[in-house]
Image (cartoon, rainbow, N blue to C red):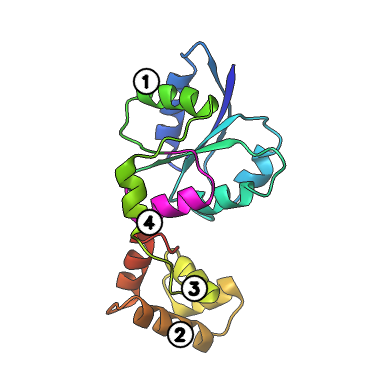
């Protein structure tokens, strides 16, 4: 039996995938979570073999969860399940040790088959995914610039970002200005989009 956990912020999709996977004779869903920021601690107690992990979630991204799980002595095999075929995301997934990168519109039968293949030791990234991922380039952003852009996805004002990161408003403003310049963007929103597309956040 393959024990599977699902971390996906869309409750309806998460429940549907879980229900359909439970119909498979050799797959058991042992955990369902809706946020990334609680996933690492919670998953340690589930004994899951394979983890279906969404990329974009509230709190902490699936890519950050995958990276954090690498520090565990016996981490689950991670499969990224996402809407986004962004080369930067694929690159970060590879660097975080993910075993597969599949899209949410895949039929559940294909997801189940991929779970079995990953559990058997296979790596499921296409040649094109790997090629485009390697062409996406390293992030020019400092850690703090990345932190500020990441927070700016969920907080509208400089004051809100500053409070969330425990920084001054002027410091946040400086980091955002630097990030805009480094991403060759016109504004904060465009800087976030570019950084996300290239897997820098």
Badge 1 crowding class, 10 Å Cα cut-off, few under 14, some 14 to 19, many 20 or more, is few
Residue at position x 39%, y 39% from top? 125
Q: Can you tell which of label 3 and label 1 is closer to the viewer?
A: 1
> Where is mark 3, residue-wise?
148
> Where is mark 1, residue-wise?
109
Query: Between residues 87 and 15, which one lies in front from this camera angle?
Result: 87
Query: In the rendered structure, which disc, 3 or 2, sits on the residue that comes first in sequence?
Result: 3
Q: Can you tell which of label 2 and label 4 is closer to the viewer?
A: 4
* Element assignment for label 4: helix
Q: CA distance from mark 3 to mark 4?
A: 25 Å
Whether residues under marks 3 and 1 lie with C-beta atoms below 8 angstroms apart, the answer is no
Q: Does residue 86 appear in the picture of this structure?
A: no
- Residue 173 is situated, as x and y percent measured from the top left of the image, at 45, 85
As drawn, 85 above or below 149: above
Q: CA distance from mark 4 to mark 1?
A: 30 Å
Q: Can you tell which of label 3 and label 4 is closer to the viewer?
A: 4
Whether residues under marks 2 and 4 lie with C-beta atoms below 8 angstroms apart, the answer is no
> Where is mark 2, residue-wise?
173
User: Where are the magenta residues, as a range?
Assistant: 85-100
| Left or right placement of residue 14 versus residue 76 in this view | left
């Amino acid at each position: 039996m393959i024990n599977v956990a699902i971390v996906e912020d869309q409750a309806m999709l998460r429940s549907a995938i879980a229900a359909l996977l439970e119909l498979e004779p050799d797959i058991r869903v042992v955990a369902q979570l809706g946020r990334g920021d609680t996933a690492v601690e919670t998953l340690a107690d589930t004994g899951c073999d394979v983890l279906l992990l969404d990329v974009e979630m509230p709190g902490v991204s699936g890519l950050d969860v995958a990276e954090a799980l690498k520090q565990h002595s016996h981490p689950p095999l991670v499969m990224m399940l996402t809407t986004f075929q962004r080369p930067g995301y694929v690159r970060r997934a590879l660097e975080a040790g993910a075993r597969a990168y599949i899209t949410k519109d895949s039929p559940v039968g294909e997801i189940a088959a991929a779970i079995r293949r990953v559990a058997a030791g296979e790596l499921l990234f296409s040649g094109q995914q790997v090629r485009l991922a390697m062409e996406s380039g390293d992030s020019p952003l400092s850690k703090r610039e990345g932190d500020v852009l990441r927070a700016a996805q969920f907080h509208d004002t400089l004051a809100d970002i500053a409070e969330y990161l425990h920084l001054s408003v002027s410091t946040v403003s400086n980091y955002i200005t630097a990030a805009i310049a480094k991403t060759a963007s016109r504004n904060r929103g465009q800087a976030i989009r570019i950084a996300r597309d290239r897997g820098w956040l």
